[in-house]
Image (spheres, grey):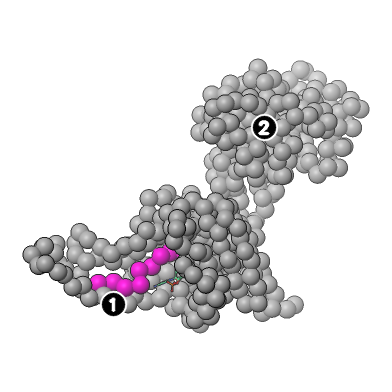
Amino acid sequence: MSNHFRLCARRILLGVTGGIAAYKAAELARLLVRAGAEVQVVMTEAAGAFIGELTFQAITGRPVRQALFDPTHEAAMGHIELARWAELILVVPASADFLARLHAGLADDLLSTLCLASEAPLAVAPAMNQNMWRHPATTANVEALCARGVRVWGPAEGEQACGDQGPGRLLEPAELLARVGELFGRGRLGGRKAVVTAGPTREPLDPVRFLGNRSSGKMGYAVAEALLREGAEVILVSGPVSLAAPPGVRLVPVETALAMREAVLEAVAGADLFVACAAVADYRPREVADHKIKKTEETLQVGLVKNPDILREVAALPDRPFCVGFAAETEALAGQAEAKRQAKGIDMIAANQVGEGEGFEVDDNALLVLWEGGRLELPRQPKTRLAERLVSVIAERMDAQATIEDPR
Ligand code: C5P
């Protein structure tokens, strides 16, 4: 699989410390961004002597972070939030001084603080004069860091900026990119094809009016992105929403339930997973007026007919994918959701309470996930994180099902 799929939407915190090789970090940032990653650069003060913030800002599209207590940035994304945001902290180049401070667990600048505060994997690419690299103090620091699980990439041997020969050269940016790709691996759904529906449908009454609903599409789009990050190939069949499709996802825009059904039935051929997040209209107007309906009458009757249940139909296909549905309920959540799971013949249902500011058009949500013989409560959290957790349960259940079907 190409790095594009491995690194798509991955959140990488790129730490840059002071050293001649700092300019190569700019090339690495460019490669990471080109591979689809989101890159946030954090520079130490010493790095600023070797390379300018604006270079990184132009490459990554994000302002560089440097100060530990910067009121502007702390208000937007505080340092602890930044530590949580990162899926990988990569320090390129890592100076001898930085390795020593990392070993000691210092937290006297932003980068060292983030390294302490984050649970994300940490990789460092040392670059320094060969004598500094060979010094017993550096050797001891590096050994201790390795023992702690820090990945130490390089250094390479060769001619140094100072004219010396020996170990201490920064690994080339392309090599570092390859290591980042390896670290993220194929993902738990690598090689799997997933189809996701999202957003509302619009059921036309006449050429200018439709019956619709308040679905924002946020949950479906977050699920699509989370699946992509786990390595799946993702087709997103989406009703009209104001969100941009995550880069790397194949978007099939539709308006009506009938169009969604058609697009889904075509897309699920050969798919391993179907996640129905769309708020499909249950009914559509029986007739669509050819011209704009005039307000001549005091009352207007609109006849409605039932839309096909796309999820139920996919679940009934002979060689069907693993099917996940959503259930928005206002009461008796677990009971209603389990009944719906069985009625639709699907593998898993994610239920959420709606009404009173919950569910639709909001960024947070909570889910109760039910499958045959199991359940998991995912507490209220941002839909993006919720989607990651849900995708992780889906991957687990798909694996479990594959083991039952093929017990070898
Ligand atoms: O039956 P209900 O609309 O509550 O079921 C919700 C689940 O079924 C959601 O996963 C939704 O995307 C899916 N659904 C569908 N086609 C419909 C109605 C619902 O795929 N016509």
Numbered mark located on residue 15 in the image: 2
Give the prevailing secondary structure in the magenta stretch: loop
Judge the density around disc 1: few (<14), some (14-19), many (≥20) Cα neighbours within 10 Å.
few
Report ligand 1 position as a quadrant.
bottom left
Q: Which residues are magenta?
A: 277-285
- On the question of residue 275 being in view, the answer is no
Mark 2 or 1: in front is 1
Amino acid type at image mark 1: Val
Quick check: 209 left or right of 364? left
- In this rendered view, identify the residue nearer to me: 309 or 283: 283
| Position of the N terminus by quadrant | bottom right
| Position of the C terminus by quadrant | bottom right
Amino acid type at image mark 2: Gly
Counting labels gives 2
Quick check: 362 left or right of 347? left
Q: Secondary structure at mark 1?
A: strand
Residue at the spot of label 1: 305
